Image: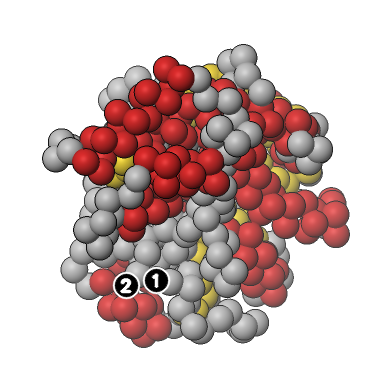
Amino acid sequence: MGINQAAATEMYMHSVGLGDLNFRHFPYTGFMTTTPSNSRVTDSAAAGSALSTGHKTYNSGIGVNADTTEVETLCERVIRSGFAAGVASSDAVDLATPAAFYAHANNRGDYEDIAGDLVNSKLTFAAGASIKSNKKGNDGWVAEARRKGFNVFGGDLKYSPCDGPVICLSNDVTKSNLAYAIDRKEGQTSLEDFTNTAIEHLYRNSRKGFFLMVESAMIDHACHSRDAGAMVNEIIDFSKSIDCALKFYEQHRDETLIIVTADHETGYTMITGGKTELIGNQKCSMNELTDIFLKMSADGNIPSWPEVKQVLADKLGLWSKVPVSKDEEKVFTRLYKESFLDSSSDMQDDLYNSNKKLAFEAVSLLGRKSGICLFGGSHSGSPVGLYVKGERAAEFMNCKDNTDVSKVIAKVARYK
């Protein structure tokens, strides 16, 4: 979530009467750099580790410094100081960003080692869509976590208040991440669910106080796909988790600190001329749109162009609410032929997904007309925002690099 992603989201919210984006109006705001030790552009592992440990590391390093020496994570420091610690993510709980706060691995892909660190940790709370593992699998690690003393909730087993450490997983542990907010169905787990549960459980199980890291990972997924509509919806959804923290803050003003930032920017996002409110016509993610197209031809029948055009109108508002020129429609009809009539490759891959080029072009056109343009599908080296509210928040105005954050947290919270 770069500075432009947050600004564009608030522009959209203003355009449709949704008010302000909460964290953009925190009393202390700034920006900071994110470069790793071995590149100009970071990945989530190196940036998460910098935020957690205060040390630069190489891309893919988890809880280690640039020469692979293990360094203390923020959660480890919190626990050593007598406080409770928790992490929550809309991705798998052992993926790079949450892992950087409790684990140590030379490579972010060492899921077995990271999951082992999770179940052997002294975290009071951990949440994610699933536990990603190439060997033991989610079920194997759940059983291991229970043997280690964790209460594990997920699938049909919903969280209930309890004592002791907890791991919360989603309603569907076969998926490595939560559903996009724009696609979420009733009953599906949300990041807000995790955040509320985390605060309740940590407060219940810690007399001294607690630290909680919450990651809205699907912002990154949307930006890798260059899906502006999904991105805007994810940031609005993330703000609901921040509302959970603000509610707690209102009850504990003299001892609560809220920090909102990002590990990096994804998508080379720019705000250009356009009608920002048009992005509200998007009713599903690019992934979901691709799935719709795949289902339309799954039985061997070839949908007609008018049928496909109607889907684009229903899901993106194209033609019906968003003007489409003749030249723009020519591009769509060419991609329609490639997708449904020809044998040529019609899929476009990004870090997490593979989408039909027709879906990509349609979502991209809506983004351009809305003035929210993602010009690349990877991370950038752009500085990220820092938004702070609460006890001793002013001290974070000295943070200019991501390695500064954990140092100031430790100072103001008086961690050892």
The local crowd at label 1, few if under 14, some if 14 to 19, many if 20 or more residues have their Cα within 10 Å, is: some
Kindly indicate whether the residue at mark 2 contacts the one at mark 1 (C-beta within 8 angstroms).
Answer: yes
Q: Quadrant of residue 59?
A: top left
Q: Please report whichever mark, 1 or 2, sits nearer to the chain's N-terminal start.
A: 2
Residue that lies at the very extreme toward the top in this rendered image: 273
Q: Quadrant of residue 271?
A: top right
Q: Is residue 79 visible?
A: no
The local crowd at label 2, few if under 14, some if 14 to 19, many if 20 or more residues have their Cα within 10 Å, is: some
The three-letter code of the residue at mark 2 reads: Asn
**Horizontal and vertical percent position of residue 227:** 47, 36
Above or below, 155 relative to 196:
below
Q: Nearer the viewer, mark 1 or mark 2?
A: 1
Element type where label 2 sits in the image: helix
The three-letter code of the residue at mark 1 reads: Val
Q: Nearer the viewer, residue 121 or 364?
A: 364
Q: Badge 2 is on which residue?
A: 138
Q: Nearer the viewer, residue 132 or 259?
A: 132
Above or below, 67 relative to 276:
below
Q: Residue at x 39, y 53 (%)?
A: 292
Q: Badge 1 is on which residue?
A: 173
Above or below, 138 relative to 401:
below
